[in-house]
Image (tube, helix red, strand yellow):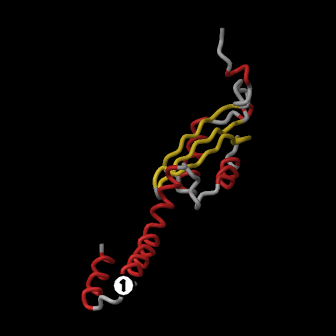
């Protein structure tokens, strides 16, 4: 709208400068693209459920593996809920022989995820190494029962 107004005013006083209209349109189009770039980028990250650029899942996994009693971390997923807000899910496998307290490991894991990495919405699933369902690629566990 502003480009139309500016070009109209110029054309009122200098009608022979017809190039002003497309030039003003071009300049304001560039200005609009520049100002909306971050909005489009953030919107696409949310729509595509992308990993936030400031979060590194491999570092989160290493931190969770540092909790005493934790022997593995798998199915770790981090995605963007909205700009500046993300979510995390992970499975934490513990050694059943270590007599580890599930609640204590869960609490330590949530503190690591929240305090160190700024993810305030997380779901951590604690499972022992005796768990029967250890692989999502095991077809006989997922097949319909007859």
106 horizontally vs 19: left or right: right
Q: Nearer the viewer, residue 96 or 27?
A: 27
Q: Secondary structure at mark 1?
A: loop
Q: Nearer the viewer, residue 115 or 118?
A: 118
Is 141 located above or below residue 35 in the figure?
Answer: above
Q: Identify the residue at image location x=58%, y=48%.
A: 78
Q: Quadrant of residue 140?
A: top right
Horizontal and vertical percent for residue 127? 65, 32
Q: Nearer the viewer, residue 119 or 140?
A: 140
Horizontal and vertical percent for residue 1? 30, 72
Q: Identify the residue at image location x=38%, y=80%.
A: 24
Q: Nearer the viewer, residue 102 or 134?
A: 134
Is 18 located above or below residue 75 in the figure?
Answer: below
Is 33 located above or below residue 132 in the figure?
Answer: below
Q: Quadrant of the C terminus?
A: top right
25 horizontally vs 145: left or right: left
Horizontal and vertical percent for residue 14? 29, 91
Q: Residues within 10 Å of mark 1 (few under 14, many from 20)?
A: few
Q: Which residue is mark 1?
A: 18
Horizontal and vertical percent for residue 79? 55, 49
Q: Identify the residue at image location x=73%, y=27%.
A: 130
């Amino acid at each position: 709208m502003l480009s139309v107004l500016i070009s109209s005013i110029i054309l009122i006083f200098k009608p022979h400068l017809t190039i002003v209209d497309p030039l003003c349109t071009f300049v304001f189009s560039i200005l609009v693209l520049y100002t909306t770039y971050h909005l489009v980028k953030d919107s696409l990250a949310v729509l595509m459920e992308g990993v936030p650029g400031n979060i590194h899942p491999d570092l989160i996994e290493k931190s969770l593996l540092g909790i005493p009693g934790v022997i593995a971390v798998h199915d770790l997923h981090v995605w963007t809920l909205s700009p500046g807000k993300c979510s995390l899910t992970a499975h934490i496998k513990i050694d059943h022989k270590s007599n580890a307290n599930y609640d204590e490991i869960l609490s330590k894991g949530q503190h690591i995820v929240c305090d160190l990495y700024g993810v305030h919405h997380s779901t951590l699933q604690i499972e022992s190494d005796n768990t029967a369902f250890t692989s999502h690629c095991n077809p006989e566990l997922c097949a319909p029962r007859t």
